[in-house]
Amino acid sequence: MEDFKNNTSYPIRNVSSFTHFFWWCSGANTDVLLDCPHSEQNKYVGIGATVFFTGLLASISGGYALYSVFNSVFPAIAFGIIWGFVIFNLDRFIVSTLRKDDIFWNEFKLVLPRLILAVILAIVISKPLELKIFEKEIAQKVQEKQQLFAIESQRKAEQQFNPIADSLRKEIDYYKSEIAKVATSRDTLYTAFIGEAEGTRGTNKLGKGPVFKEKKMQFDKIEQDLKDKQAQYQPLIDEREKQILALKAQRDTSVAKALPVISNYDGLMARLDGLSELPQVPSLFIMLLFICIETAPVLSKLFSAKGPYDEKLKNIEHEIELSTIENINFRNHELNKKLTLYTNIDKAQIDQEILNNKESLKIMADAHVELTKEMVNDWLEKEKDKLKTKV
C-alpha cells in the first residue's frame, strides 16, 4: 500500500473535513482518493453528498409518517433518525460495493438488484412526503369520505328502524281513521239536528220537534260511539307513538356511536386512500424525483468511465489478493515441509525398528540352535548311558 502511494504521480492534497465526511458517505477509500486527481475526488464528494441527503430526506419522511399515525413528536423524531440511518446505511452499502468492470453488461447485471432496491427505497421515502405536500387536498378527500360514511351510517340506521316505525305509523293512521270516521258522522248529525232546531234544515220548522229529538238521539248515540272509539284507540295511539320515539332514540344512539369511529378516520391508511383518489401525475413526478435522487449514486458510478480511483483500488485489491495467495502458498509449503520431515522421521524409526527386529530374530535363531545342540547332546549322552547299562 505504501509503495503504491509513493509511486503515484498525483500530489496529496489537504482536504476539508466536509470532503472527508462525504467521501466516507460514498463508501470510498479515503487513502486512495487522496492520491487521485481533483476531478475524481469531486466525483466521490458528489456521490457521498447524494447518499447523505437521501438519508436525510428518508429521516424526515419516516418521522412525518410516524407522526401522522401517532401524533406524537418525540417517538416520530426517534423513528425518523433511525429510519434515516437505515436508508443511509443501505445506500452507502449499495454504492461502496459497486465495482467498475471492463464489460458494461457484466457490471449492469451486478447493479440491477441494487437499482431495484433503490427504486423500492425511493417509493417508500416519497409516500410520506407526498402526504405532507398534498395535505390540504388529502384532508378534503378524507372529510368527504367521513361525510359519506356518516350518510351511510344514517342510511343503515334508518333501514334498520324505519320499517318498524312505518308499521307503527300505519297502525296509528288506522286508529285515527277509525276515530275520524265516527267523528265525521257525529259532525254530520250535529249539523243536522242543530239545523232542525233552527229551522234551516230537515223540516225547516223552528223548534225542537219530534224530528229534532230523533236526530238528537242519533247524535248522542254516535257521540258515545266516538268517546268509546277514542277510549279504545287513543291509548294504542299513544303507545305506538312512544314506540316510535323509542325507535328514533335508538336510531340516533346508533348514529351517535358511529360518529367517533367516523371522525377518527384520519389515520395513515385514510390519508393514503385519499392520496390515491387525487390526480396521479403530481404524485408520479414526486416519486420519479425521489427515484432519480435514490438511484443517482448508483447510476453515476454505473455510467461513469473507469477512473484512477478504480484502477488504484483494483491494484491494491489485486496486491492484497496476491499477498493472501502468497501467504497461503507459504503456509502450505511450510506444512508440506513439516509433513515431509515427519514422514522421514517415521520412516527412519520404522527402518530402525526393522533392523532391531532382524538382530533380535538372529539372536533368537542362534539361541535356538544352541539350545537344539544342547538338547541333542543331552539325548546322545542318555542313549550312550542306556547302551552301557545293557552291556
Image (cartoon, helix red, strand yellow):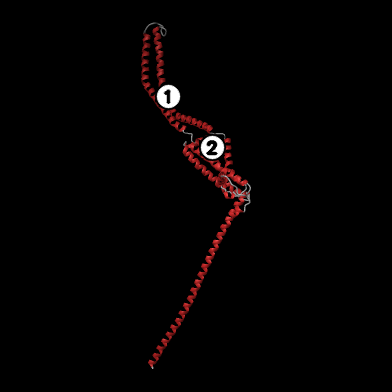
2 vs 1, front mark: 2
Q: Residue at x 40, y 15 (%)?
A: 185
Residue position for label 1: 169
Q: Residue at x 54, y 45 (%)?
A: 90
For the image shown, how many numbered marks are present on the structure? Answer: 2
Query: Are discs 2 and 1 less than 8 Å apart at CB?
Result: no
Mark 2: which secondary structure?
helix
- Counting from the top left corner in percent of width and height, residue 111 is at 59, 47
Amino acid type at circle 1 is Arg
Q: Is residue 29 visible?
A: no
Q: Residues within 10 Å of mark 1 (few under 14, many from 20)?
A: some
Q: Which labelled disc corresponds to residue 257?
A: none
Q: Disc 2 or 1, which lies upstream in sequence?
A: 2
Residue 14 or 313: which is nearer the viewer?
A: 14
Q: Is residue 277 above or below residue 390?
A: above
Residue position for label 2: 129
